[in-house]
Amino acid sequence: MGGAQPLAITMNEGVALIAEVERWRIKKRIETKYCDLYFENIDDAIDRALEAKQNGEAVSIAVLTNAVCLLERLIERNIVPDTLTDQTSAHDPLYGYVPHTINNTQAVIMREQDPNQYTDLAYASMHRHVELMIELQARGAITFDYGNNIRARADEYQKRTPDSRLTTIDCFSFPGFVPAYIRPLFCEGKGPFRWAALSGDPHDIAVTDYTIAKLFPENRSLLRWLELAKEKIAFQGLPARICWLGQGEREKAGLAFNELVRTGKVKAPIVIGRDHLDTGSVASPNRETEGMLDGSDAVADWPLLNALMNTAGGASWVSLHHGGGVGMGYSIHAGMVIVADGSEAAEERLKRVLRNDPGIGVIRHADAGYEIAKETAKENDLDIGQRLKV
C-alpha cells in the first residue's frame, strides 16, 4: 500500500480498496489519517467498499492481504473496480516483494534459508499479479501501474519459463501512469514543486499557501489542493508543502518566497526542492520516460545535463541517484534543492535554477517531438535551436 494512494482517492471523492501484507504499515496509515478503515477479511473489506460506493461515501479501506489474493477474490465475485492501479514494490524480488503463496513469517525465514526458491516464488507471483490486472482490464477496469517494475519482472519470468508452464501474456498491455496521464504535464514543465519552512513554524507554510493562491488564482485544481492539504495532511518533520507548478510558475513562486523572507513575513529561509519524478530530471524506461515518442526512453544524458545545469545555475544542493523505486539499472535521477534566504544573491540563483530546472524538461520533450513541449518552449523563450523547427 502506497502512503499517498488512499488519501489521494478520498480527496477526489472516491472509494479506495487497498491490499497491504504488513499489519504495522496499515496501522501507521490509519494513525496518520492517510487511510480510514482496516479489515483483515477480504470479503468484509470488499463488501464495505461496495456499500461506500453505493452510498456515495468517500472512504479508504485497507485489507490485510496480498494484492494477488485481493484481485483473485474480486474476479471470483465478478466485481470490476472502476479503476485499478498498483504500487507494489517489485524492483527487488528477494527483499521488496512478498509472494502470495507464503505468509510474512515464512517469507522472512525463506529469504535467509533459501533465497533462490524465494526469488522463484516472487517472480511467479508477480506474473500472476500482472495476469490478474490484465484480466480486470479486459473486464472494463481502467488499469495502470505506478512503474515499480512489476510488469518488467513478470515479463522476465515469462521469457525464462517454458511456455507449457504458464499462460503467456502481454505484460505491458496496461501502461504506467506517466505515459497514460502525466506526460502532457511534463511537456509544459509541470512537476512536483516542494518547499519547507526552515523556521519549523507551521504559520510560515500558511503564509506560503496564501502567496501561492494569490500568484495563481486561475488554477482551480491548485487552489482546491491547497485547501485539502491544510485540512487533511499533517506535517512530519519540518512544516512543508508540495504542489505541481510548470515552466515560468516555479521561478515566479521562488522569487515570491525570497521576498517573503526578505520582508520578514516568514521567520526564516525557505528551502525549495522537488520530487525526483519530474519533467527533465530522470531517465527511467519503465516509468517517467516509458514509451517516449522518439524511442529515447533509456537515454541518460538528460538527467546528467539537468544536474550540470543546476550546479552551474547555483543550486544549494545537487545530487545524482540511481534506482528511484524501479531498481538499480532501471533509472537515473538528478535532485535539486535551492534556498530562498531573502538576499539579492539568492534572487539571482532562484531566477536561473527555477527557470532552467523545468526548462531542460520542456526541451527534452520538445526534442522527442511533443508539440505541447515545442509550444511551451516558444511561449517561455526557451532557445532550443533550429533542429526542432518550433
Image (cartoon, helix red, strand yellow):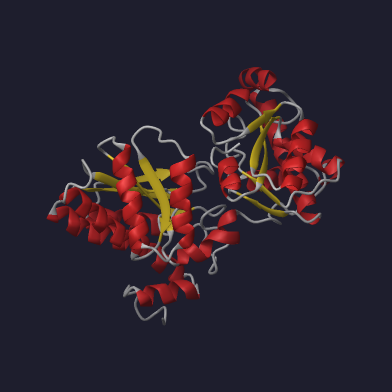
Q: Is residue 267 above or below residue 353?
A: above
Q: Residue furthest front?
A: 55
| Quadrant position of the N terminus in the picture | top right
- Asked where in the image residue 386 lies, by quadrant, the reply is bottom left
Q: Is residue 145 above or below residue 188?
A: above
Residue 314 placement (x, y as % from top left): 21, 53
Left or right of residue 150: residue 82: right
Residue 39 placement (x, y as % from top left): 70, 28
Front-most of 360 and 23?
Answer: 23
User: How many numbered badges does the structure rendering display?
Assistant: 0
Residue at 53% in and 41% down: 327
Residue at 69% in and 19% down: 106
Q: Is residue 57 above or below residue 120?
A: below
Q: Residue furthest left?
A: 344
Residue 265 placement (x, y as % from top left): 21, 47
Residue at 40% in and 55% down: 281
Left or right of residue 37: residue 376: left
Residue 80 visible within the image: yes
Residue 226 placement (x, y as % from top left): 43, 51
Residue 301 visible within the image: no
Left or right of residue 167: residue 334: left
- Asked where in the image residue 390 lies, by quadrant, the reply is bottom left
Left or right of residue 36: residue 357: left
Front-most of 310 and 347?
Answer: 347
